[in-house]
Image (cartoon, rainbow, N blue to C red):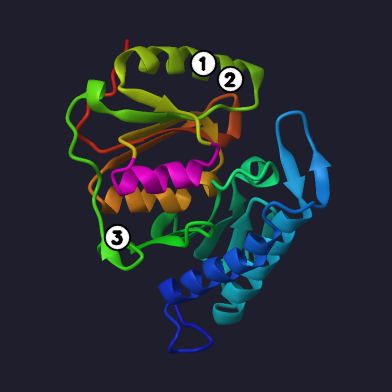
Amino acid sequence: MTASNPSSSPLAVAIAAARAAGDLIRPQFGRPLDVAQMLAHDIKLDLDVQSQELITSTLLEAFPSHAIYGEEGIAGDQTSDWQWIVDPIDGTVNFFYSIPHFCISIALRHKGEIVLGVIYDPMRDELWEVEKGGAPKLNGKPFQVSQRTLLSDAVVSVGMSKSPDVAMQATVLLEKYVRRARKCRLMGSAALDLAYVACGRLDAYIEQSVSLWDVAAGQILVEAAGGRFQAVPRADNPDKISVRAWNGIIDLSVE
């Protein structure tokens, strides 16, 4: 892989792109926003598109032969072995409702394997980063998953899908974990949930139906921090996956 600027590493470029996107969206927090699409259980903002365009331009300026696969569309050379996976605002509904829990998520995949992940929370100025084979870091400091061993001591985040059938599955699952874990949370940002699992704030994250851009960066962070990540394609929707991520120690069985 060759950058147009030889001094620019993929990780450095991804961090720069994430921070630039954070600088774009942070001043808009709490202000009236232009809505591109208002759905029953989701919101699409013009700012989502602007954030992805900024990230795309930063990445492709450094790596013009790469592909971009993002929530707001694709760009670059889609035949490339190098693919950037981008969620320009993960937690858009939180952002729209002035709930300061959202992030920018950027991952790099080479021939199907995720080799780099960056997640940036612009409200707390927290940046998680990792490259394949390296130590994951939060604002420059290494971290690892929690060392809790019992589900009864654990804090578990259970994500809720918009589909009625999948939401029902998640509700049943949530009820089981509410009874067995110390606490359950529904936080509204899959990428941040995974970052929190990676650095030990959460012990597990479970969601029945998410997209690749929601979890790609979080996957490599969790695994590099010593945790486990499982993803299973959904038979009813090939574009969605069911995900479990946890510290690798706790037994998540609730049947």
* Residue 190 located within the stretch drawn in magenta: yes
Q: Residue at x 36, y 53 (%)?
A: 220
Alpha carbon distance from label 3 to label 1: 32 Å
- Label number found at residue 136: 3
Q: Is residue 110 visible?
A: no
Q: Quadrant of residue 12?
A: bottom left
Label whose residue precedes the other's in the sequence (3 or 1)? 3
Q: Amino acid at mark 3?
A: Pro
SS for dot 2: helix
Label whose residue precedes the other's in the sequence (2 or 3)? 3
Stretch in magenta: 188-201
Alpha carbon distance from label 1 to label 2: 6 Å
User: Mark 1 sits on what residue?
Assistant: 171
Label 1–label 2 contact, CB within 8 A: yes
Instruction: State left or right for residue 159 relative to residue 182.
Output: right
Label 2–label 3 contact, CB within 8 A: no
In front: 11, or 159? 159
Q: Amino acid at mark 1?
A: Thr
Circle 3 crowding by C-alpha within 10 Å: few under 14, some 14–19, many from 20: many
